[in-house]
Image (cartoon, rainbow, N blue to C red):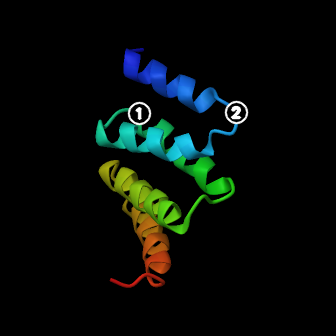
Amino acid sequence: MDKMQDALEYAISVKNHNHVLMQAAQILTRTKRNPPQAIELLRQYLSGPPLEDASVFKAHYFLGNIYQQGGDTQAAAQEYREALAMAKGYTL
């Protein structure tokens, strides 16, 4: 394991870490490392108390991206639909 992975593992091991889950998943997604762990972190984030609607929207969007990159277009489409359903409440 490298230093980045060690830091992520430490951050998500801290109690009351829901706010860290999204950030850790974003790092894993952007660096294209460990997609299964990014999915797990995002699922944990979504199963906890939501911090804000925008972050829940982002979690579904990032899940869609991960599934799409992995070739699971059905799961990606479902996550994008979830994100779009939430976006209906926002205006520009």
Is 84 drawn above or below residue 11 in the view shown? below
State the residue in front, 74 or 55.
55
Q: Is residue 41 visible?
A: no
Q: Residue at x 42, y 65 (%)?
A: 74
The three-letter amino acid code for the residue at tag 1 is Asn
Q: Residue 63: percent from the left, percent from the top?
A: 44, 55
- Position of residue 57 relative to residue 18, above or below, is below
Please tell me which residue is depicted at 55% across the width and 23% down the height of the picture.
Answer: 10
Tell which circle, 2 or 1, labels the residue nearer the N-terminal end.
2
x 69%, y 57%: residue: 49
69 horizontally vs 8: left or right: left
| Quarter that holds the N terminus | top left
Is residue 54 toward the left or the right of residue 73 in the image? right
Quadrant location of the C terminus in the rendered image: bottom left
Q: Which residue is mark 2?
A: 15
* Crowding near the residue tagged with mark 1, few <14, some 14–19, many ≥20 C-alpha atoms within 10 Å: few
